[in-house]
Image (cartoon, helix red, strand yellow):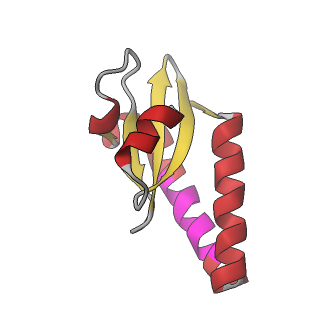
Amino acid sequence: MQLEVSKRAQQQWLRILVYYNEKGGQCAAANLHQKYLKKKDRLLKYPESGFLEPLLSDRIIRYRASVINDYYKIIYYVKGDTLRIAAFWDLRMHPDKLRKTI
């Protein structure tokens, strides 16, 4: 399985890591990134392991989500042999914003 990360998701992840680095230090940002890498590897091996994202159930694309930690989750979908990360979502945000973002 191949991995694609949308430009929006890349920008979101960079902003999250910068925030973690500023607020919690380099170690906190590195720990979060390690959690993401483990989750990504699991999703590439078991792409259906994420749950169907209920906030996006009305979409044609079947978006799935997988929680990274208490605050963030990966929003993704599978198309053929490609897992595409569409967004990194802050769980503290209002759900309507996710619908507007994707």
Q: Where on the picture, by quarter, is residue 58?
A: top left
In this orientation, does residue 46 appear?
Answer: no
Instruction: Please report the residue visible at 40 percent of the width from the left and 58 percent of the height from the top.
Output: 91
Residue at 49% in and 16% down: 80
Quadrant of the rendered structure where residue 5 is? top right
Count how many numbered circles sit on residues in the image: 0
Q: Main secondary structure of the magenta part?
A: helix
Q: What residue do we see at 39% from left, 52% from top? A: 94
- Residue 22: image x %, image y %? 72, 79
Instruction: Say which residue appears at 37% left-offset and 36% top-offset.
Output: 64
Residue 86, by quadrant, is: top right
Is residue 32 on the magenta stretch?
yes
**Rendered location of residue 20, percent (x, y):** 64, 74
Quadrant (top left, top right, bottom left, bottom right) of the N terminus? top right
Q: Position of residue 76 (x, y in %)?
A: 47, 36
| Residue 63 image offset from top left, x and y in percent | 39, 30
Q: Is residue 31 left or right of residue 59?
A: right
- Indicate left or right for 39 with 60 as reference: right
* Residue 64 appears left or right of 52: right
Q: Observer-nearest residue: 1 or 82? A: 82
Q: In the rendered image, is residue 24 in sight?
A: yes
Give the magenta range: 29-39
